[in-house]
Amino acid sequence: MNRTLSVLAAAFVVSVAIPAVAPAQESMAAEHKSIGLGFHNDQAPVGVRWWLAGQKLGIDLGLGYDRTPAPFTADEHLATFRFDVGVPIVLKSWSRFHFLFRPGLAYESQEVETTAPLGPFETAKNKDLMITGELEAEAFLLDNFSVSASHGIGYDSFDPAGPGDKENSFFTLGNNFTNVGFHVYLFGSDR
């Protein structure tokens, strides 16, 4: 069932995107405002992309926050804070399409409950720092509306709450049509 829904969703996205992008090939280049609201990373969804230097170099900023009930202590909550920063660099640009290299940095601080049985409510923090390098495709479906997907590599340094040692690892990442970023360019000048 999930595979069928995925195939139908992909077919819908393609059928909507192709007619929207095809007429754009007649124009020389996508012209859009330079500051867009949206996100690159769905873990930090309140964000902005700001294009500088003739829209060849930009800055991505994203924030995320969760507040959930503590699992073992009634009336207490745990918070998670995230931020994501990136520098999209246009490698190649076509009509309504940018191919980007995006180095990025993400940080997450997550409270975890460390309460001993029948003890007072106590917390500690897991800390996670990620450095990424991604290749991103940003397609402008409308003049000031884009969707994007990316893939790349990353380095993760995880510092668990409590006495555990820091864990370092490398990983690959990818965002596809089920996990797309978007930007709505509302502010700033065109090109």
Image (cartoon, helix red, strand yellow):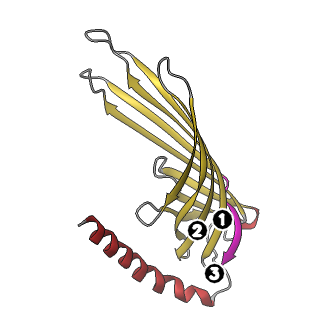
Callout 1: few (<14), some (14-19), or many (20+) C-alpha neighbours within 10 Å?
many
What whole-number distance in Å separates the C-alpha atoms at marks 1 and 2?
A: 6 Å
Query: Above or below — where is 176 with respect to 106?
Result: below
- Residue 95 numbered tag: 3
Residues at marks 2 and 3 touching, judged by CB atoms closer than 8 Å: no
Q: Quadrant of residue 96?
A: bottom right
Q: Choose the circle earlier in sequence order: 2 or 3.
A: 3
Residue at which label 1 appears: 100
Residue 14: x and y in percent read 43, 79
Q: Is residue 154 magenta?
A: no
Q: Which residues are magenta?
A: 87-95
Q: Choose the circle earlier in sequence order: 1 or 2.
A: 1
Residue type, mark 2 in image? Ala
Residue 51: x and y in percent read 67, 61
- Residue 137 numbered tag: 2
Q: Residue furthest top?
A: 119
- Nearer the observer, 179 or 3: 3
